[in-house]
Structure formats: structure tokens, C-alpha cells
Image (cartoon, rainbow, N blue to C red):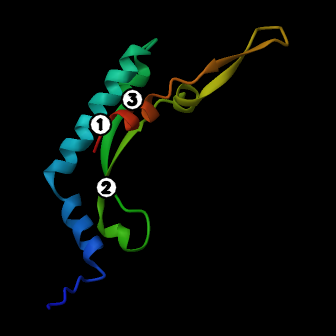
Amino acid sequence: MADLYISKKAALEAAIIAGNRPEMDEAAAATLRTAKTIAIRNRLTGDYLRSLGTAKVRGESGTGTLVNDRVIYTTDEGALSIEYGHMVRYKNQRRVRWVPGQHILQRTMKSVAL
């Protein structure tokens, strides 16, 4: 019976190869389209929708710095409040109201099957 040897670096080598494939850009673009589709249903001004984008980034640490990853991002200053919710205080009052988050990026990741 023959033995099979798999290099310990195989996962890293596969990630490096995959990170340079155009299919990764296509998957990121499809995910961005999904995010924009979800965001457009919840828009007030369109600023958040226009702030969505995709970028190719390097891995953060260790041997991952050799890997090209894709991220979906937003540059909107209110992104955290839009995503997770926030409190609104009524002018000259102690009363506050909770505005629930829209969870646009969370819903995007749940709906995209990669």
C-alpha cells in the first residue's frame, strides 16, 4: 500500500494561489452586489449605499501576509450605528429611543453562500 505525503505548507500554498485568482474578485463583487441590494431597501439618503466598496488586502500577520484576501467595506461615518443600532435623545428632554440596527453586512454574509 502506498503512503501519501501532504506538505504542512499545502494550506498556505493553496491560499496564496486562490488569492490571486479572478474568481476571488468575482465572489467579492457578487457579495458587494448583495450588500448593496440589502442596503438599498433601508436607505434614507443613499450615503451608506455609496460608501460600500470592495478591496484586495494582504493577510494581517505571520505567513498570512503572503495571501491576498478580499474585504467588503463601508466608509460611512455612521456605519456602526446603522449596522448595530443607536440611541436617539429627544431635544431638551431626558427621554431616549432605541433605533434598531439594520444589520446590512451581517445579513449579506448570511445570504451569500460561498
Q: Which element carries disc 3, helix, strand or loop?
A: helix
Spatial CA distance of label 3 from label 1 is 15 Å
Rendered position, 97 above or below 114 = above
Report the front residue among 91 and 19: 19
Q: Position of residue 3 (x, y in %)?
A: 19, 89
| Residue pointed to by mark 1 | 31
Q: Position of residue 23 (x, y in %)?
A: 16, 49
Q: Earlier in the sequence, mark 2 or mark 3?
A: 3
Q: Quadrant of the C terminus?
A: top left
Going by the numbered disc 3, the residue's amino acid type is Ser
| Residue pointed to by mark 3 | 51
Badge 2, how many Cα within 10 Å: few under 14, some, many 20+? many
Q: Which mark is residue 80?
A: none
Q: In front: mark 2 or mark 3?
A: 2
Does residue 58 appear to the left or right of 6 in the view shown? right
Q: Which element carries disc 1, helix, strand or loop?
A: helix
Callout 1 touching callout 2 (CB < 8 Å): no
